[in-house]
Image: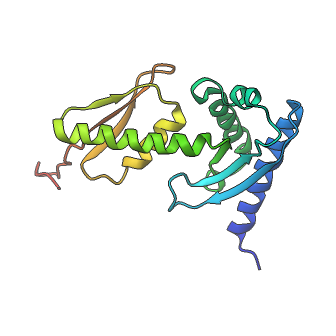
């Protein structure tokens, strides 16, 4: 017997797959969408909607990805916004749209960038501003560093010039003014 959570997740998977396949069809792109579910123990948890690149030309792939991933980011944002309509927040999965290994490669780049900037902050004690990230990429770096006891992150500014700042975590004081750490 399927649990309620499993049934909801299966429905979310089918909704995401059907939505992306319909969108691709409306764009005149005849291809398949494969689905992989990644749990919270993996780097990017969520429902991965993987577009089969086999029937696509290099030009179609590049157009779909866009400069610095802007088009696929916009499509992923649209998917998450539309597919969450009418769904209770605790049942809203994260949809990740993948094409030609772009997300996987970018995730490795972001992890390396995060490690580089984290080391700089820890060595210098000064905050570092990480430029040119999409909102989804900023959220990924926030998540990467969430468990680091020495660092904290914050997004500052307004789109399209919003930046992620990594800095040393300020120890929290208790009501006596003594640091908790």
The quadrant of the rendering that contains the N terminus is bottom right
The relative height of residue 31 versus residue 67 in the rendered view (above or below) is below
Give coordinates of residue 38: x percent, y percent.
Answer: 60, 59
Q: Residue furthest bottom?
A: 1
Foreground residue, 139 or 171? 139
Quadrant of the rendered image containing residue 157: top left
Give coordinates of residue 109: x percent, y percent.
Answer: 46, 40
Quadrant of the rendered image containing residue 102: top right
Left or right: where 106 falls relative to 47: left
The figure's colour scheme reads rainbow
Give coordinates of residue 150: x percent, y percent.
Answer: 24, 49
Foreground residue, 22 or 181? 22
The relative height of residue 5 versus residue 51 in the rendered view (above or below) is below
Foreground residue, 66 or 78? 66
Task: Report the residue at 71% width, 74% height from top.
Answer: 3
The relative height of residue 10 versus residue 115 in the rendered view (above or below) is below
Give coordinates of residue 148: x percent, y percent.
Answer: 31, 52
The quadrant of the rendering that contains the C terminus is bottom left
Foreground residue, 103 or 4? 103
Left or right: where 133 falls relative to 118: right
Left or right: where 122 falls relative to 138: left
Task: Report the residue at 72% width, 69% height from top.
Answer: 4
Task: Report the residue at 52% width, 59% height from top.
Answer: 42
**Number of callouts in the render?**
0
């Amino acid at each position: 017997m399927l649990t309620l959570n499993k049934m909801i997740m299966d429905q979310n998977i089918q909704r995401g797959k059907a939505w992306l396949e319909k969108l691709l069809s409306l764009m005149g792109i005849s291809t398949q969408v494969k689905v992989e579910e990644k749990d919270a123990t993996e780097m990017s948890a969520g429902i991965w909607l993987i577009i089969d690149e086999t029937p696509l030309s290099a030009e179609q792939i590049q157009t779909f990805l866009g400069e610095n991933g802007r088009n696929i980011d916009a499509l992923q944002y649209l998917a998450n916004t539309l597919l969450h309509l009418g769904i209770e927040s605790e049942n809203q999965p994260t949809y990740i749209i993948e094409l030609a290994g772009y997300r996987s490669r970018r995730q490795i780049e972001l992890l390396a960038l995060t490690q580089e900037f984290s080391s700089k902050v820890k060595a210098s004690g000064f905050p570092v501003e990480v430029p040119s990230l999409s909102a989804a990429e900023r959220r990924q770096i926030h998540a990467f560093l969430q468990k680091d006891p020495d660092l904290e992150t914050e997004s500052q500014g307004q789109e399209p010039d919003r930046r992620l700042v990594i800095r040393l975590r300020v120890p929290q004081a208790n009501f006596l003014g003594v640091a908790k750490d």
